[in-house]
Image: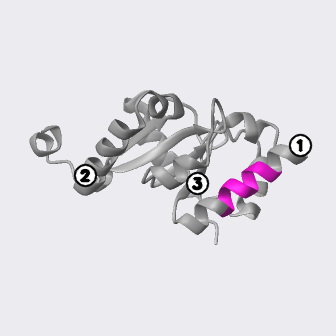
Amino acid sequence: MVLAETGLDPRRLEIEVTESALLSNPQVALAIFEDLRALGVRVALDDFGTGFSSLSYFRMFPFDKVKIDRSFVADLAGHASRAIIQWVIELSRNLGIVVVAEGVEASAQLDTLREMGCNQVRGFLIGRPQAATGFESERRRRPRAKRAA
């Protein structure tokens, strides 16, 4: 197994799945998820809110994290998108699931998501994709971000 070969702590590995991966064979997906979680690997549902989102995913699959699709964050000022994001955050909190809002590109979005209780964010406001060689120098150059209370 690759984890044994590399010596990587399984708790440091997170597998992301999309909803379409769950639709083809939910029973096989569930068995794989249970095996991964037994090893300590975390499982995240990516791009929640696109495709055929279903509440049954939260009941059926042992997710550690749910990632809200960037289209909702882009429309955060819209009443419906804001209500959906708040609902996903509250549902996930009650189920012990970490929430990541993707596509955060403006400080106002970050502030609103913090107020809503979102655990984590991703997007160009936080950092742009870059080669691994430039990552370490960029990390040292940037001041440490304050954590939300």
In this view, the residue in front, 133 or 46, is 46
* Mark 2 lies on residue: 10
Asked whether the residues under the numbered discs 3 and 2 touch, taking CB atoms below 8 Å apart as contact, a structural biologist would say: no
In the rendered structure, find residue 19 and report the number of the disc placed on it: none
Sequence-wise first label, 3 or 2: 2
Query: Does residue 61 appear left or right of residue 47 in this picture?
Result: left
The location of residue 125, given as percent across then percent down, is 67, 41
Question: What kind of element bears circle 2?
Answer: helix
Assess whether mark 1 and mark 3 are in contact (beta carbons under 8 angstroms): no
- 20 or 39: nearer the viewer: 20
Task: Classify the position of the N terminus by image quarter.
Answer: top left
- Disc 2 vs disc 1: Cβ atoms closer than 8 Å? no
Q: CA distance from mark 3 to mark 1?
A: 20 Å
Per the image, the residue denoted by label 3 is 99
Element under label 1?
loop
Q: Is residue 127 left or right of residue 111?
A: left
Q: Position of residue 55 (x, y in %)?
A: 61, 49
Q: Position of residue 12 (x, y in %)?
A: 31, 52
Segment colored magenta: 83-90
In the picture, residue 86 is in which quadrant?
bottom right
Q: Is residue 97 above or below residue 27?
A: below
Q: Amino acid at mark 3?
A: Val
Whether residue 94 is visible to the viewer of this picture, yes or no, is yes
**Label 1 neighbourhood size at 10 Å, few (<14), some (14-19), many (20+)?**
few
What is the C-alpha distance between the residues marked 2 and 1? 39 Å
Residue picked out by circle 1: 78
* CA–CA distance in space, label 3 to label 2: 20 Å
* Residue at image point 46% right, 48% down: 140
Residue at image point 68% right, 36% down:
70
Circle 3 SS class = strand
